[in-house]
Image (spheres, rainbow, N blue to C red):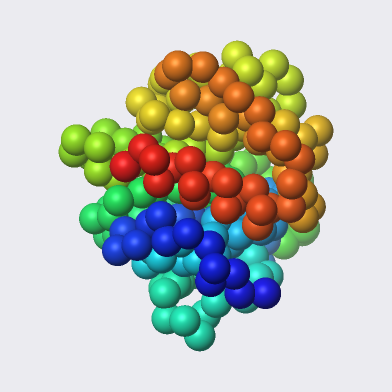
Amino acid sequence: IIAFFQKKVLAGKKVLITAGPTYEAIDPVRGITNRSSGKMGFALAKAAVEAGAEVQLIAGPCHLTTPLEYTGKIKRTDVISAKDMHAAVMNHLDCDVFFAVAAVADWSVKNASAQKIKKSDQSNPALEFELNPDILAEAAKKASGKKPYCIGFAAETNDLEKHAQEKRIKKNIPMLLGNLGPDTFGLDDNQLLIVEEKGMTKTNKLSKIALSREIIQLVSTKI
Ligand code: CTP
Ligand code: CA
């Protein structure tokens, strides 16, 4: 359903969104990923377009078609690894709002093999990890003045309020949205804890598109 009757609160604004998981190769046929479906990021992309924005969506490997593709208002770049996603984001930082919705792998496999690892090669493979760049923290550091307004997401398993506020401060971003869960991955509904310097509020439990419209409305008052 196209909801072009939404208020055009982001008319003329450029919105950058990362969505989905990333995939870190172990060898050419195996890798490490996570449970992110991309649904929240894609819903935000749709809500941003409904609000009049132009969207650059950087999507990790997920099985979703681009919402409102035919409007030409969403440009999509598909990436695989966190490093690819980092490079794509750095190329598109000239925007008004950056939603870091992707579940970015924290580590990549340092000793990934160029050939398929065979069971007979060795006993159990010993993977070595190296830290991936923190895309959101770097974007926030590069932001000049209020541009882009950077919003992070967080899924925690415990003590959401504490972790979310600490994370917001550490990444130096004005807003972090915590999944109130208990689970959100792959689901169509979500409930968010909105964390800002001034404090926290909870949204209702809503479909990801309805939630996205509320978030877009809120963010439009900040930029
Ligand atoms: N993020 C990012 N680049 C990374 C890791 C995270 O851009 N390498 C972004 C996510 O898109 C999200 C926010 O940072 O918006 C918080 O991600 P999260 O994984 O919760 O935070 P981390 O700092 O990675 O901390 P941890 O996983 O240890 O809780
Ligand atoms: Ca992480």
Q: Is residue 169 left or right of residue 200?
A: left
Residue 120: image location, x then y, percent: 77, 58
Q: On screen, 187 above or below 130?
A: below
Q: Nearer the viewer, residue 166 or 32?
A: 166
Residue 204 left/right relative to 115: right
Q: Position of residue 155 (x, y in %)?
A: 66, 34
Q: Nearer the viewer, residue 90 or 140?
A: 140
Q: Is residue 184 visible?
A: yes
Q: Nearer the viewer, residue 84 or 140?
A: 140
Q: Residue at x 58, y 62 (%)?
A: 42
Establish if 183 lies above or below 196: below
In the rendering, at what x and y percent does residue 8 appear? 42, 61
Q: Residue furthest bottom?
A: 70
Q: Residue at x 38, y 57 (%)?
A: 10
Residue 162 as seen in the image, left or right of residue 186: left
* Up-down relation of residue 28 to residue 191 (above or below): below
State whether residue 100 is above or below residue 204: below
